[in-house]
Amino acid sequence: MSIDAVRALAFDVFGTVVDWRGSIIAEGERLNRTRGLTVDWASFADAWRGRYAPSMARVRRGDLPWTNLDGLHRLALDELLPTFGVSGLDEAEVDRLHRVWHRLRPWPDSVAGLTRLRERFILGTLSNGNVALLVNMAKGARLPWDVILSAELVRAYKPDPVVYRSAADLLGLRPNQVMLVAAHQQDLRAAGAVGLRTAFVARPMEFGPDNPPDLTPDPAFDLVAADFLDLAQQLAC
């Protein structure tokens, strides 16, 4: 099927648009310097992100009531701080660390690539991140979204089909008029299953230099790009 009908690009955010791991490490190393800590923040970042899927699973099972991603991140942080021997932080410092997810830094190509893509397409997030988090991140990183779409709006998490369908519904478009752009193949497969078009963008450094992801794209994806600038070129932007 041709992608000529695509009018909107919906972006996964964590890992696709922004470098969550590098941002958390930088924030933590600042704490090491200012508070005399010796925390391995690379391991901390990996452990924090590692609680992501299990935390959402607890909500799906009914072990937790509906909780947005800010709430899940805080639950995980409160468990991880003592595990990593982090003590002596006051509530303001813990809150600032918790909100590092609102201040994640974009990959080097993100802003320039998005700016080019926005000349032709409606651009929006389609993330498990909650609305406040995504808005604050956009302001801080200067991400040029037209719209913030979040799984929070339908009280579900990707890869629940309702999240992907909501992107088309809220934009008044058919599913095949929306393309999900993501660095995560499971996300793209779930989007494709409900009729969205799909673009895989490789982010080989998402999990650090020692943990490269599988970059062999599923042949079912409509487009495969090295970064957002490459995607813009392929889409004639």
Image (tube, helix red, strand yellow):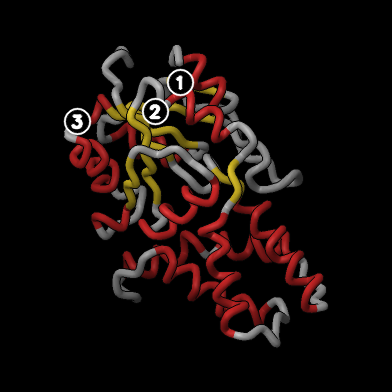
Q: Name the residue under label 3.
A: 173
**Residue kind at label 1, given as amino acid type:** Leu
Task: Kindly check if marks 3 and 1 are in contact, taking CB atoms under 8 A apart as contact.
Answer: no
- Nearer the viewer's eye, disc 2 or disc 3? 3
For image coordinates 40% across by 48% down, the residue present is: 127
**Residue kind at label 2, given as amino acid type:** Thr
Check the image and report above or below for 165 versus 37.
above
**Residue kind at label 3, given as amino acid type:** Leu
For image coordinates 62% across by 85% down, the residue present is: 90
Q: How crowded is mark 2: few (under 14 residues within 10 Å), some or many (20 or more)?
A: many
206 displayed left or right of 119: right
Q: Element under label 2?
A: strand
Q: How crowded is mark 1: few (under 14 residues within 10 Å), some or many (20 or more)?
A: some
Q: Name the residue under label 2.
A: 198
In percent of width and height, residue 46 lies at 64, 59
Task: Kindly check if marks 2 and 1 are in contact, taking CB atoms under 8 A apart as contact.
Answer: yes
In percent of width and height, residue 66 lies at 30, 69
* Separation of residues labelled 3 and 1 (CA atoms): 20 Å
For image coordinates 71% across by 47% down, the residue present is: 208
59 displayed left or right of 90: left
